[in-house]
Image: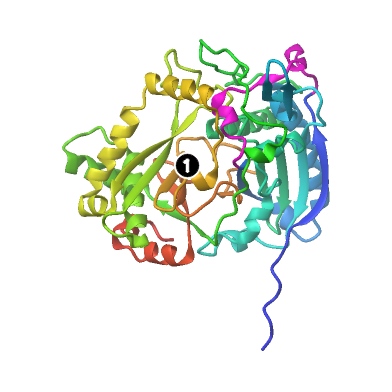
Amino acid sequence: MTPPPPPQSVRFISDCFVKPPQLPPQSDHPLHLPPWDLAMLSVHYIQKGLLFPLPPHCLEIGSDRPAFIRSFLEKLERSLSSALAHFYPLAGRLATLKRAEPPLYNVVVDCANSPGARLIHAALDMTMADILSPTYVPAVVQSFFDHDRAINHDGHGLSLLSVQVTELADGIFIGLSMNHALGDGTSFWLFFNSWSEIFRAQERGAVDVVQLSRPPVLTRWFPENHPGPVSLPYTDDPSSFLARFEAPELRERVFHFSADAIAGLKAEANRQCGTTKISSFQSLTALVWRCITRARHFPPSQVTGCRMAANNRGRLEPPLSPEYFGNSITPLRTAATVGDLLGSGLGWAAQLLHAAVAGHSNAKLREWNQEWIKRPQVYHMDKTFDPYSIMMGSSPRFDKYGNEFGLGKAVALRSGYANKFDGKASGYPGREGGGSIDLEICLPPATMALLEADTEFMAAVTVS
């Protein structure tokens, strides 16, 4: 019997480091990080990217594809440099400021002493169909991102932003790895959107410095009675507060929910509760929570949780700008026994989630920050997310398919190894828009098979 061919692997071609054309005067001072940022030091970088088709002329026999790729990389490098002028902390590195008396252990961003963000060119002998056709996301997609398994504290030595451009036979994948201690998903996509805006402006003949339609707000938010910096209660040994998480064997699948299916879930959840207040995403989250819990076969008395990443910008008083660049999220937790969750309807679960979101107030956010400053602690994946719960991350509200780099609209969004575990789900807008949603779900193989056989769940899924 002929053995199967070895799996394809990504080939590294070249890399360089990219700096902004010039740094502002304030970059000479360390950027102090508030509690929401420092809590992220032990989790992974954010890794998201977009798959674009190559122009048809690059696929023709006799075309000068290498020249096109060289020109494309040069444009990416130029526009990335310009983007970093607006987001200059991403060109820096983390640094730890220590003092014996009075005691100080403070992790900051050193914006001045760094080689910059990393830009990588790589290649893979596979087609877009090889990536998108399988039911489960191929493991090779994890190789489309730099800083594999790196945690944010590693940003002392690693770039805080790395861009990997991977050539396929008929496409290009642009994968970004951004240090999560510098920003959340809102910040990540603000940077991606801004970089794309600059690329398009320069294609139209703009100069290196492009004025953004949504410039980032880089000033960090600290509670008024503790304007910073925050000293961490740690020693010279970072291993005393860091933990590296290795995920179990997982299957990762992207499920598509049409706009009609989402509208149907929302209408049913609200009808069951006699209200109109439950949102589309709360209704979808309730469905996922119920169906994954059913697939796990826990006893009725087991308590199961559902966490949702809540954006705090508009909940603070006064509110933060939507363009606030940093972390401003809280993983809201709702809990119920398995018996109650599965014995009640979709609306019951959605109403629990809605109540958690509605109760997420300015007072609670300030209380969290005050308690954290008294007793600082960083998130650990294995402790923050238990095996009886699910976590809904990312958001279908982010503008993900509006990013274009002269290649037209992306055909798909994929993510790396980072921050995945049993029960992690990430919401993306469907490519066709209109309120459709793609949901990336990670589960062990046996649990995934049971979810795929769940009639309530699959009735809402559009199977292509």
Quarter-wise, where is residue 353 in the image?
A: top left
Quarter location, residue 187: top right
Q: At label 1, which amino acid type do we have?
A: Gly
Could you classify mark 1 by the number of other residues whose Cα lies within 10 Å: few (under 14), some (14-19), or many (20 or more)? many
* Residue 356 is a magenta residue: no
Q: Nearer the viewer, residue 50 or 6?
A: 6
Q: Is residue 35 magenta?
A: yes
Image height of 378 relative to 7, above or below: above
Q: Residue furthest front?
A: 101
Residue 314 is at least partly visible in this image: no
Tell me what residue is drawn at x 32 percent, y 46 percent.
286
Residue 341's x, y, as percent? Answer: 26, 50
The x and y percentages for residue 243 are 61, 44
Query: Measuring 62% from the left and 19% from the top, which residue is drawn there?
Result: 218
**Residue 56: image x %, image y %?**
68, 53
Q: In this figure, which residue is indicated by the disc labeled 1?
A: 393
Q: Residue at x 28, y 33 (%)?
A: 355
Which colour scheme appears in the figure? Answer: rainbow
Q: Residue at x 60, y 47 (%)?
A: 418
- Give the magenta range: 21-43
Percent of width and height locating residue 247: 56, 55
Judge from the rendering whether residue 309 lies leftward or rightward of residue 76; answer left or right: left
**SS class of the residue under badge 1?**
strand
Q: Is residue 143 above or below residue 27?
A: below
> Left of 342 or right of it: where is 365?
right
Q: Is residue 121 visible?
A: yes
Q: Quadrant of the C terminus?
A: bottom left
